[in-house]
Amino acid sequence: MKRILVLALCVFTLFGLAGCAQSANTPQTASKQDQPLVIATSADLGSIDPAVAMDNAAWKISYPAYDRLVNFKGSSTDVEPSLAKSWDISADGLTWTFHLRDDVKFADGTPLDAAAVKFSFDRLLKIKKGPSDAFPSLENVTAVDKNTVLFKLKTVFPPFLSTLATNGGGIVNPAVMKHEKDADMGQNWLATTTAGSGAYVLAEWVPEQSLKLTVNPNYWGSKPKLNTIIIKIVKDPSAQRMALEKGDVDVAENIPVDQLKELKKNPDLTIFETPSLMVDYVYLNTQKAGLKNPKVRQAISYAVDYQGIIDNVWQGNATQMRGPIPNGLWGYQPDLLQYSRNVEKAKALLQEAGVNNLTLNFMYSDRKPWWEQEAQIIQSNLADIGIKVNLQKIAYAAQREKIDKGDFDLTIGVWSPDYADPYMFMNYWFDSKNFGLAGNRAFYKNDEVDKLVRKAASINNQTERIELYKQAQQLIMQDAPYVFLVQKKYQLPMRKSVQGFVFNPMLEDMYNFQAMSK
Amino acid sequence: MNTSKFVAKRLGQLVLVLLGVTLVTFLVSHVVPGDPARMLIGQRADEQTLAAMRQALGLDKPVWIQYLNYLWGLIHGDLGTSIRTQRPVLNELLSFFPATVELTLFAMGFAVSIGILLGLLSATFRDTLTDHATRILAILGVSTPLFWLGLMALLLFYKYLGWLPGSGRLDPLINPPTHITGLYVVDSLISGDWIALKSSILHLVLPSLCLGYIQLATIARLVRASMIEVLELDYIKTASANGIPRSRIIYRHALRNALIPTVTIIGLTFGELLGGAILTETIFAWPGMGKFVVDSISFLDFPAIMGFTLVVATVYVLINMVVDLLYPLLDPQIKGVH
């Protein structure tokens, strides 16, 4: 009896607290245009500060919340005016003058002017995290008058205009400095909130559960059709699939390729498909004794069963790469040498190189679910030409560390460009200044190639650059420092009701929310 | 030894256990290759940026200094800053802990109540159809992988029947109830937020039943076994011979004794449930500590991993202490065990 009394007392005390607490929900009837667009994604986001965030998952939020001087145009690799109405380049290619729109306000109502642009780039360079890498030659930014801003470069950097359209080029409200702590330029505060002029603002973030974007009332562009966007974190791919089929989510990002075939049969769903610029390739550590000889590397490139990988791993949703630059980006060479499986030739090359009983380690991680399958196929392909491959699966963080130190024989990775310039491939992958994680993960050094790619990065003339990159690519294909596997097709299953989605290959896993509807 | 002395001794042991846990976790997470600073700055940053980041995170110092710094922070209630989210680990854990506790408590309530009931039925109607059915149910529970069970439950109750929601703690359009305890059910009850209450209870059903089912099986089997054992004892026979009704013998005389080993298991179960919650949270997109720690592990975010380990270790030790304290209540004979 006593216990019951105590229990009753507890319950009453709890209800007593009710007076202090306000109910957060009232019964509501939602109208059609208030229906949110719901996107399921597999992991919660890290910092969404444009000067800090380095992955597309976080850019999904920051890209529509901030504006940039220029934007990628539709699904193309060109840029179009955004905050900047127009721009001029000095004859030496070092000074860029941008003329800003004068009707832009940040979400809090303060005007966006040249000072805010200068502030954003000063902040980006001072914080000096990943996103600032896209601006290696930027010397300084000056606000000439309210609507004119001047960028001074140290050296000619041809991709410059394109880099302004990356997420790191987002213009941040200088008011963030009110939230500065320990001289962090407001990084801590901006990690979980937005302070831009884009079409949407981050309204709510329940960690590991969901993020909610709502329309920016002060947005200068045309009013978005969707009032609310919800990003829901659903880790398990099967759970995502069920939620999509039921209509609880409109877009599901992480459904494996082999399940998409089934989803195509569902009349309520559509699979958005388009070629992407994301490539999947194997790094051969050219500094390792067994892999020093280009003939051995050619033999490996000839041994791999590209079609088998496309058919089995990708179920046909990928194409074989032809050289480093993917199809769809300028600089791609349609007549470049493309390796195909030729066991006899591979064996002959090994013999010429005088190599037998070669044993190599193939290191990979579970970062991408398809790597294991590809590693196994390549293991058996290389066994066919007498190379023994030991598979070595390690944690992703460890894989990155070992790549950086060159502590591997073979390993695998993906790459997609942040801005639309072959520089993203040619200079990152092959310039011997970029050994390790920085991009040259084959530790490849060819003085002639160094000269060509560096020259191509120092002039603005596109025709000349294409020619330089072409010569470099021809040398590279003979040296075979990587096995150029596949260029992935971008596939995104969504409800049929979702309209207006445009995919830009530079903005993978991101959305043009302001033009979408449901 | 009296109760307060016992509690003091246990708390003293807790400090030692936690010290050991920090040492082991710290060493393991630092021996593993991989550099969280690299993960943070993106893949194309140069050496200088990397060095600056390592310095900012304190990763440039020798490991033992890093460890002492960590302990020093710990004494002051500072669990460090998560490398991945850049927020204080303590705040992160506090924000995810209630979700996990809520899930675990519901799973536990389900497992204990139904588990004891089934065990009891099974023992009382030994070798009948009820017994066999219950035992099959229990064996299935012990041998079913959690992820499979979770997916099947989702398929049936969420996708085909549509009775229950499949992911998260609340409908995304419903605002979380006013934060009081962090347990949505309790909070929405207190603030009279019936919409949130309904949604949060519905969201709890599938994950807590799945998580609880496996423990339910263990409990049911244990209760059955100890009930059968107790029912064979002389005092039960005496009671029977004295004409005491069977139902009274079972509930009053036998069950109480049979529950003593069960209480121990329930204590251990709580720890297992906290661990099992990691998998359940992944399948049902439950925003608890499990999901947080899985993401942290893949990032090698050791302050977060250590914070999680510490919390689980603390809870585990405390629960076992409570279990030990419960024995004398169940069985007045046990006084000297402490």
Image: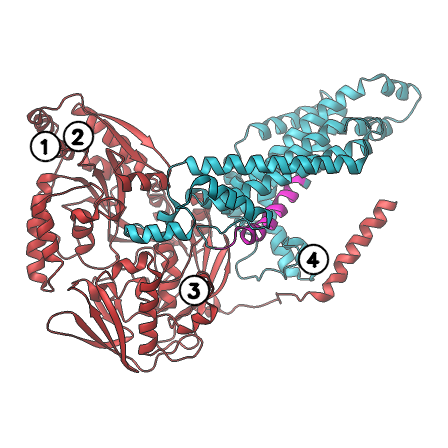
Q: Residues within 10 Å of mark 4 (few under 14, many from 20)?
A: some
Q: Report, in whole angstroms, how far the alpha carbon at label 1 lies from the one at label 2.
A: 13 Å
Q: Magenta segment: does it hold A456? A: no
**Residue matched to label 1:** A295
Any idea which chain is the red one in this picture? A
Q: Earlier in the sequence, mark 1 or mark 2?
A: 2
Q: Which mark is residue B189?
A: 4
Which of the 4 image quarters holds residue B222? top right
Q: Which one is closest to the eye, mark 3 or mark 2?
A: 3
Contact, CB < 8 Å: mark 3 with mark 1?
Answer: no
Q: Earlier in the sequence, mark 3 or mark 1?
A: 3
Q: Nearer the viewer, residue B227 or B59?
A: B59
Q: Earlier in the sequence, mark 3 or mark 2?
A: 3
Question: Which chain is home to disc 3?
Answer: A
Q: Which one is closest to the eye, mark 1 or mark 2?
A: 2
Any idea which chain is the cyan one in this picture? B
